[in-house]
Image (tube, rainbow, N blue to C red):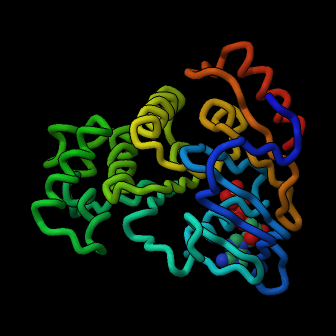
Amino acid sequence: MSQLAFAEPAISAAVIELSGVEKRFGSLPVLNDISLKVYQGEIVALLGASGCGKSTLLNIISGLLPPENGVITLQGEPIERFRRWHKLGYLFQEDRLLPWRNVRQNVNFGLEAGNLGREERRQRVERVLKLVGLEGFGDAWPHQLSGGMRSRVALARSLVVEPEILLMDEPFSKLDPQIRSTMHDELLRIQQLTNMTVVMVTHDVEEAVVLADRVVILKPHPGRIHQISAVDLPRPRVPTGKTVTEQVRLLRLEV
Ligand SMILES: Nc1ncnc2c1ncn2[C@@H]1O[C@H](COP(=O)(O)OP(=O)(O)OP(=O)(O)O)[C@@H](O)[C@H]1O
């Protein structure tokens, strides 16, 4: 792992670029001078102690929350001009499934803000259900599903828009370790297929090392970038493997 602060990969133009981003809530400064570039097909983990502003930063990248200062561009467009509904997927900590809708209808929810025709929507939903391993479960209801399956439905709903950027806020943190690990594999498989750019929030160092190409470590009061580390281990990364354990130890010293 490169311990160089602000290490950046030598690849194409940034898909996400933040420059001098600041955020306050009332008199509380939450983010201070955040500058970061994320490149096509990268998985970047935002890692840090509770309250350091990880979720706030993700919400700013998504355009849900305006910053006080700073510039944000997505694929070179100012964020307010970025056509969010079909380029950006957002996966939350809770699966947020609607209990009165079956699996297919929950996934279709991701498309309802757009202007695709009924047949195109139907095909996309079926395609994405297959992609996440839920083929044949379209008619099931949320209450009939295990935690892992619910998590797959939420992932499908965020992928059905075929996003170029996927933002994830600790989506697997409530799953038990075995299912969590399966979801990590699934995410990596889908990312390889689609070459999506992924920014994920986590407070789990091991999750960051297993999934990310780069780990951005934030420190609190106010939230700021402390270090950016490239994780250049081969995949698949085994959480209990020697190299991963060593990286986890090194990053833990920084968090
Ligand atoms: N809507 C809000 N209004 C006021 N303060 C807020 C709001 N949202 C977040 N904060 C505060 O901003 C700070 C950063 O919160 P944020 O949720 O971004 O941190 P985090 O690193 O994601 O934390 P956690 O790991 O616990 O989810 C915290 O002090 C929090 O209390």
Which quadrant holds residue 225?
bottom right
User: Which residue appears farthest toward the left when viewing the image?
Assistant: 119
What residue is drawn where x is 80% and y is 65%? 34
Q: Residue 158 location in percent, x, y?
A: 39, 56
Q: Quadrant of the C terminus?
A: top right
Give the residue at x 26% y 71%.
112
Task: Give how far across and how far down residue 73 sits, in percent.
Answer: 62, 70
Which of 7/184 is in front?
A: 7
Point out residue 192 in the picture as x, y percentages from the top left corner: 45, 35
Q: Point out the quarter of the image occupied by ligand 1.
A: bottom right
Is residue 150 visible in this depiction of the protein? yes
Residue 200, can we see it? no
Residue visible at 37% across and 52% down in the picture: 159
Q: Residue at x 79, y 51 (%)?
A: 49
Q: Nearer the viewer, residue 43 or 185?
A: 43
Q: Identify which residue, 51 or 37, lies in the foreground.
A: 37
Please state if 153 lies on the left or on the right of 220 as rendered.
Answer: left
* Residue 200 higher or lower than 51, as above or below: above
